[in-house]
Amino acid sequence: MATGAHMRMNTDTPPMRIEAALILSQWFSPAYPVGGFAYSHGLETAVQDGTLRSAAALRVWLEDVLLHGSGRNDAILLGAAWRARSQAETDRIDATARAFAASAERLRESALQGAAFARTTAALTGHDIAALTYPVAVGRAAGLAGLPLEPTVAMFLQGVMSNLVSAAVRLVPLGQTEGQAVLAHLSPLCARVAAQTAGLTPEDMTSTAFLSDIAAMRHETLTTRLFRS
């Protein structure tokens, strides 16, 4: 582990100040009040219908979400908001984020978490951060705070994956160690997606994680639900 005033995320990115790392760690901590614990991103449907019954199945499912679905798209949206130079530009990016939501619950999930993140972060930083979808709010806040893009994206994605792993631990159920093993496997992929999407724009957004999207749609009609999505 690096010591001193800076630390490296990987060999391809410049050093990140410890202060910036601590800010990002706080933002994406389970203690930060965005309400992520209430959402499963459609995992609850996949567990109930028997699709997800093991840590191995969960790992493959979340890999697809991260590399080919909402994870990659959220990384692109976050980067676009980080680069935005006006509120009007940010609002256009946010409109794209809302249009790409695969279901009503997915939209609500992103909108409510984003509004909660914006509210808390604005109070802490004094920056003017509107109620935006979650990745757009994070990108806007990180840009205003002068935080580096690639580590912000990587840690945002890891935070999202951590929340979904936590939901699966409760739903499947899985052991805590199994869940942490899945997250350890996914963490390098978070860094890879952050690097691959660093220069992309919303025009580069695509999604082929169809089972995840369909599970999110079907979640709206589940009779018994623990999660809001």
Image (cartoon, grey):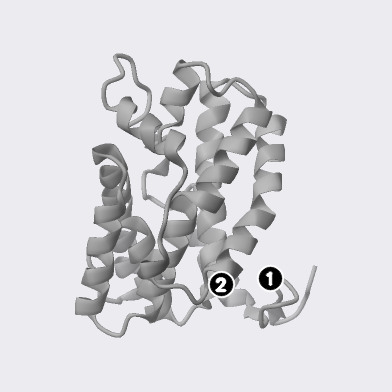
| Mark seen at residue 173 | none
Residue 153 position within the rendered picture, expressed as x and y whole percent measured from the top left:
52, 65
Q: CA distance from mark 2 to mark 1?
A: 9 Å
- The residue at the far left in this view is 88
Q: Secondary structure at mark 2?
A: helix
Residue 190 position within the rendered picture, expressed as x and y whole percent measured from the top left:
60, 57
208 relative to 155, above or below: above
Between 118 and 205, the one lying in front of the other is 205
The local crowd at label 1, few if under 14, some if 14 to 19, many if 20 or more residues have their Cα within 10 Å, is: some
Q: Earlier in the sequence, mark 2 or mark 1?
A: 1
The residue under the point 66% across, 29% down is 55
Between 64 and 208, the one lying in front of the other is 208
**Quadrant housing the N terminus:** bottom right
Q: Give the residue pinned by disc 1.
A: 9
**Quadrant housing the C terminus:** top left
Q: For the residue marked with disc 2, what is the amino acid?
A: Glu
Visible residue check, residue 115: no
Residue 41 position within the rendered picture, expressed as x and y whole percent measured from the top left:
41, 38
Q: Is residue 65 shown left or right of residue 101?
A: right
Q: For the residue marked with disc 1, what is the amino acid?
A: Met
The local crowd at label 2, few if under 14, some if 14 to 19, many if 20 or more residues have their Cα within 10 Å, is: many
The residue under the point 30% across, 67% down is 123
Q: Secondary structure at mark 1?
A: loop
133 relative to 109, above or below: below
The residue under the point 43% across, 58% down is 73
The residue under the point 38% across, 50% down is 33
Q: Give the residue pinned by disc 2.
A: 150
